[in-house]
Amino acid sequence: MNGERICRTMIDLALEAGAGILKHFRSRQTMTWTKEDESPVTEADIEADQVIRQGLSREFPGAAIVSEEQSESHALRLTEDGFFIVDPLDGTRSFISGKPDFTVNIGYVVKSKPVFGVVHVPASGRMFFTRPDGSSAEFDLNGASGSVPNINGKTLSVSLPDNEALVVIASRSHANAATKAYISRYRIARRQAAGSSLKFCLVAAGEADFYPRLGRTMEWDTAAGHAVLSGAGGDVVRLDDGSSLRYGKPGYVNPDFVAFSPGVVLR
């Protein structure tokens, strides 16, 4: 599959899905349901999912597409040739509560590794993405929607952290005791909180040094952000054995992990 075509398509679809989500967000009238796992889902999630899946299927007929909102896709037989993995609206709780840090996530995984990714923040206009050469960049669209002229953008690079004064970013809605205990191992100068996969991207942009997550996440929550962080020089590793987080696992459930700039001395 052509890397430039994949990246261009994912950017365009993220923008289109994001524009629809933003209309719901501004109207504050979207319908909401509760899924079997007791997590919320909204009209905006479903509509964005349709936009992305239909667009990917049109551009890449026969490609495997795993989406959070399509349970039948969770049973797809995957190959090492590659598959798309989608969270059409990551941070649904933030979206419902009126917080602007929800994202559109589209990733492409080859041989268990996320090689391309797009994370779009519709409410702010920030879009983080991988280029065809594997590097990562950002557009600042200032809340605008529509096409972008190229896939260059501003190059992203992780921080050069001071291990005596680290900046940590953690989940706003999942700040559990285990996460707090892990963070307490480090010398922290500043703490930030955010929802969705935006946390990976803020590490990729050098705005935070590391992001630990101790608790349940799914691969569609992390694949696109992981790709962006990798392209900026960062990494995402399991906390149990220090190996890189892999994708296409049975059930798509992630172990505890930390996303970080390599300058951070992990403890």
Image (cartoon, grey):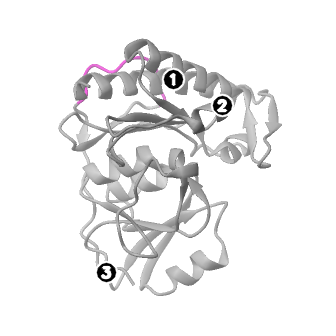
The residue sitting at 40% across, 68% down in the picture is: 210
The residue sitting at 24% across, 29% down in the picture is: 3
Q: Residues within 10 Å of mark 3 (few under 14, many from 20)?
A: few
Question: In the rendered view, would you say 3 is above or below 228?
Answer: above
Q: Place residue 152 in its image quadrant.
A: top left
Mark 2: which secondary structure?
A: helix
Q: Decide which of tag 3 and tag 2 comes sooner along the chain.
A: 2
Q: Residues within 10 Å of mark 2 (few under 14, many from 20)?
A: many
Q: What is the spatial separation of the Cα atoms under label 3 and label 2, in whole angstroms?
A: 38 Å
Question: In the rendered view, would you say 246 is above or below 169?
Answer: above
Position in image of residue 23 (x %, y %): 64, 23
Magenta stretch holds residue 149: yes
Please give the range of residues in magenta. Answer: 143-151
Question: In the rendered view, would you say 157 is above or below 103?
Answer: below
Q: Decide which of tag 3 and tag 1 comes sooner along the chain.
A: 1
Q: Is residue 259 visible?
A: yes
Q: Decide which of tag 1 and tag 2 comes sooner along the chain.
A: 2
Going by the numbered disc 2, the residue's amino acid type is Asp
Q: Which mark is residue 184?
A: none
Mark 3: which secondary structure?
A: loop
Magenta stretch holds residue 156: no
Labels 3 and 2 touching (C-beta < 8 A) = no
Going by the numbered disc 3, the residue's amino acid type is Val
Q: Nearer the viewer, residue 150 or 267?
A: 267
Quarter holding the N terminus is top left
Q: What is the spatial separation of the Cα atoms under label 1 and label 2, in whole angstroms?
A: 11 Å
Q: What is the spatial separation of the Cα atoms under label 3 and label 1, in whole angstroms?
A: 38 Å
Going by the numbered disc 1, the residue's amino acid type is Ile
Q: Which residue is mark 2?
A: 45
Q: Which residue is mark 1?
A: 52
Q: Which residue is mark 3?
A: 265
